[in-house]
Amino acid sequence: MTTTTPPAGTDHTTPTTALVLGGGALGVSIATHLARAGARVTLATSGELCDGASGRSLSWLNSAGDRSPAYHALRVLGVDRYRTLFAAGPSRDWLRFTGGLWWGDEGDREGTHARHADEVARGYDSHLLTRKDVAGVFPGVNAEATAEESIWNPGEGWVSLPHLVDHLATELRTLGGTIRTQLGECSLLVEDGRAAGIRDASGAELRADAVVVACGAGTSAVMAGAGVDIPDGSPLAMLVTTEPSDAQAPVLNTPRAAMRPNPGGTFCVDHDWYVDQIVEHEDGHCTIDESVVTELLAEASRLLADGTPLKAGTWASGRKPIPADGQPVLGTVGQLPGSYVAFTHSGATLALIIGDLITHEVMSGSRHPLLESFSPDRFTA
């Protein structure tokens, strides 16, 4: 775990117990890192592990496109942590570094070159490819479906978050951690001006010295219940997992479909052009007409050589966690001692590094320099 010296004069008692609210990739990673650091950890979640956004994430591991220097640095470190995990178990079929191929709208050559230039300026491995290049490098991709020029980022990868969560949860239990599921809607328990635990839907209380809230799009509501404002901008989204196919392709990000390989010869596919067709019901569950799923997979099939037809296996929709300003919200909550937040759109890429850095803050009592730009306190008047 990363270590730094707490600032002079800090009155900090290393917590003995920690509670993490949220059963997705961020929550399970944080809980596992805390257990590695010696805390007695309880992971609590309203439903089952990975039944929220982590179960329907494209989970493309990257720092492509235009990002602030601090956000880029964090994402690159996030990908690096996955490389360490991959090196420890390269036979795992749920974590791969196949690279990523991106292209924009046909005719927007200027935009493609600007994106490539930004990536090169940050030292990100980025290469411009013509259609002929794509045909030569990726025989499984339909080069005719690409734009005149594409960007190839060979260092990128993907992870199946349900598999990652299962892997980390197994370690958490081995380290003596407790996992509590099906608790219903939970709220923060606040006593004497500090976080003291949570109260579940039945009214039962779980107490701990430190509480980390990492419950995706529900984070804002949980923190608001304790008087902490973290504006939410989480949009609706959908992910489709296909039936098995013989097709071969890297991660593809295109104007009408984004897709990645998935264990078992399947693909995961999503995009945002159909967001206004997702219906969110009063009880929070979401539905979408099957014709939209069919149309999305037709777009994805076009990207594959010979137009390999992809068939839907399953699909799920719901809120995609994104703070209102688009930037991650990570770490110590100054106005509510004893509490910490992990709320970000890039939960897949950042899951492992954030587990490490938030554990540092919990156990040391000092802010980690890499999280300064993403402090929850930026929303405090």
Image: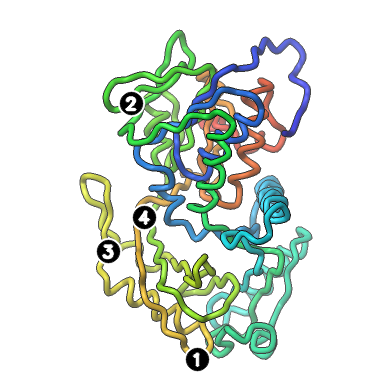
The colour scheme is rainbow
Mark 3 lies on a secondary structure that is: loop
Q: Position of residue 89 (x, y in %)?
A: 68, 55
Q: Nearer the viewer, residue 107 or 133?
A: 133
Residue located beneath label 2 in the image: 200
Residue located beneath label 4 in the image: 236
Per the rendering, the mark at residue 38 is none
| Badge 1 density bin: few <14, some 14–19, many ≥20, Cα 10 Å | few
Mark 1 lies on a secondary structure that is: helix
First of labels 2, 4 by sequence position: 2
Outermost left residue: 282
CB under 8 Å between callouts 3 and 4?
no
Which is in the foreground here, disc 3 or disc 4?
A: 3
Q: Nearer the viewer, residue 341 or 179?
A: 179
**Image point (49%, 74%), residue name:** 255
Mark 4 lies on a secondary structure that is: strand
Residue 323 shown left or right of residue 120 in the figure = left
Residue 35 shown left or right of residue 55 in the figure = right
First of labels 3, 4 by sequence position: 4
Outermost front residue: 174
Mark 2 lies on a secondary structure that is: loop
Which is in the foreground here, disc 1 or disc 4?
A: 1
First of labels 2, 1 by sequence position: 2
Q: Amino acid at mark 1?
A: Asp
Q: Residue 2 appears in which quarter of the rendering?
A: top right
First of labels 2, 3 by sequence position: 2
